[in-house]
Structures are given as structure tokens and as C-alpha cells.
Amino acid sequence: MGKRNMGSNFDDFLQEEAMLDDATAVALKRVIAWQIAGEMKAQQITKTELAKRMHTSRAALNRLLDDADPSLTLTTLASAATALGQKVNIQFTTVG
């Protein structure tokens, strides 16, 4: 007989500890920062150039690319996407 998993999954644990929303926000920000950095590399665009295209400071761009900083506005995300010749697609999905 095989062993069965006992207990709940990790999302349930995070929810019980009131940490799920924060953990999800950090994970999403890490993916977004990774995607932007990857597109910058693919297009050989420097931080200075991207900040110029976004009409923002390099410090603001560094915050956007900081995967440990979960704060992010949709305006900043849309600006980065446009500056990279991309578009943003946000979608809700059913849990469960």
C-alpha cells in the first residue's frame, strides 16, 4: 500500500496563517520582474534606456525590477510593457 498525504496543502497552511495573499503578491512580482528583465535582455535594452522610454527615473525602474518589493501599480506595469513593445494581459481564474 502506498502512503497517502496527510494534512493540508501549502496554500491551506498559508491561508490558515493569514499569509497567502502576501505570498501570492511576492510570487507574482517575482514573475513580473523576471519577465521584464528577460525582455530587456532579449532586446538588449539597458535600465537607463527603459527608464527613459517609460518617462520615469532609474530608481523607479529599479523598484519595478526588485523582486523582493511586491508593490507595483498597473500604470507602471503598463508603461513598462509599452516601452518594451508588449502588452499586459491580466486574468482571474477559478480557484479549486
Image: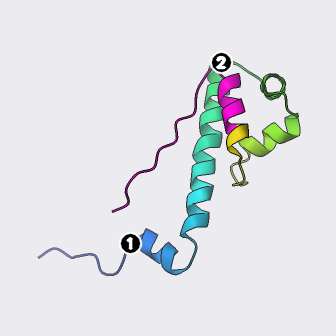
Which label belongs to residue 9?
Answer: 1
For marks 2 and 1, give the CA distance. Answer: 40 Å
Residue 71: give x, y in percent of width and height: 72, 53
Q: Which quarter of the figure is the N terminus placed in?
A: bottom left
How packed mark 2 is, by other alpha carbons closer than 10 Å (few <14, some 14-19, many 20 or more), is: few
Which label belongs to residue 92?
Answer: none
Left or right placement of residue 6 versus residue 45 in this view: left
Sooner in the amino-acid sequence: mark 2 or mark 1:
1
Residue 60: give x, y in percent of width and height: 83, 40
Q: Name the amino acid type tagged 1.
A: Asn
Query: Do the residues under discs 2 and 1 have CB atoms within 8 angstroms?
Result: no
**Where is 85 relative to 67, above or below?**
above
Residue 80 belongs to the span the image colors magenta:
yes
**Where is 38 relative to 32, above or below?**
above
- Magenta extent: 77-96
- The residue at 86%/34% (across/down) is 58
Q: Which residue is mark 2?
A: 43
Colour mode?
rainbow
